[in-house]
Amino acid sequence: MARVFFYSPHPDDETLSAGLALVWYLAHGYEVHVVSMNRGGNGGPLGSFNGNNVCNWAEHAYTHNPGREGYPTLTPAAIGAARILECRSAIGAMATVTPTAGYTAGALYHHEGGLLDAFGTSPSGVNDVKTIIAGYAASHPNSFHHTMSYTDDHPDHAACGEGLRQLKLENPSLVNSRFFVSRLYWGPSPPRPADVAATPGLAWFNAGPRKAEFDSVLRNRVVKAFSAWSPAAGSYAIGYHQVAGQFANNFGPSASIANLWHA
Ligand SMILES: [Zn+2]
Ligand SMILES: [Zn+2]
């Protein structure tokens, strides 16, 4: 069984930037490993959840009251734990895709990298990323390894890309590694950043003739994991509280779902 790893800087990047590709891999019988490098505990508007201000998510736009709504005051650690569950729900939904004719269903594995919040700004950040990827490359030879582009403006994303970029140069077995570009940098409006445009092998992921079905899995199942508000059950819609605009741009009713990657 062909095998692919996606090193996701935070829970949601695997969906926002590589979701279409991951659904394609699962439909084509791949063993898909998603590695959440960091839990994203610093992400998500803590003040909104804890009722310190009017909730910033437009769907809410009221002031939360944790006690009345049935959930404890949230901490960064609680946010991180809840984001991991959102990610696992999302990739589990990806795996509901019907296998393409001639293929058996793909297998899905979730792992955690355990990197600290803001690891991308740590002096050891890139090396920490390399250690994690090199470990999986050694334990699972003949796999594909993907992450976010090293051109990304987010330090954590860029550190993941830079780590894989260095390993790819050092290790011929990683020659097929690819880097996904966040929709934030696709252009043309604002213009595509020059460093993205200059990457080798920049191309749209080719999802093939079943793309409409894959889009439907993403739009109608996967993203629900990030918008489900059921706080007494531990489901906090953190993805939408944090980056509702990105979910709308990637998966909204009028969005053209796509993934952009480079070599
Ligand atoms: Zn991220
Ligand atoms: Zn809210």
Image: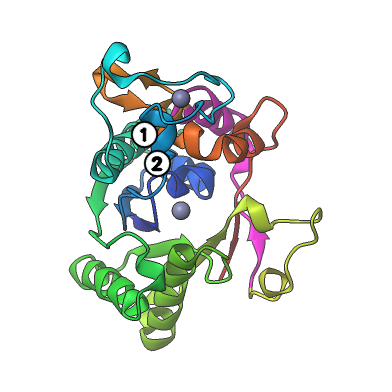
Q: Position of residue 87 (x, y in %)?
A: 35, 39
Res 196 quadrant in image: bottom right
Marks 2 and 1, how far apart at CA: 6 Å
Name, please, the residue furthest toward the left: 139
**As rendered, which of 38 and 71 lies closer to the eye?**
71
Q: Quadrant of the C terminus?
A: bottom right
Q: Amino acid type of disc 2?
A: Leu
Looking at the image, residue 187 sits to the left or right of residue 101; the answer is right
The boundaries of the magenta stretch are: 201-223
Element on which disc 1 rests: loop
Within 8 Å of ligand 1, the CB of disc 1? Answer: no
Is 73 rendered above or below residue 28?
Answer: above
Residue bearing the label numbered 1: 95
Q: Position of residue 31 (x, y in %)?
A: 30, 49
Name, please, the residue furthest toward the bottom: 170
- Contact flag, marks 2 and 1 (Cβ < 8 Å): yes
For the stretch drawn in magenta, what is the main secondary structure?
helix
The reply to whether residue 177 is in sight is no
Residue bearing the label numbered 2: 26
Q: Position of residue 239 (x, y in %)?
A: 45, 36
Q: Amino acid type of disc 1?
A: Ala
Res 119 quadrant in image: bottom left
Q: Residue at x 38, y 80 (%)?
A: 167
Q: Residue at x 72, y 70 (%)?
A: 197
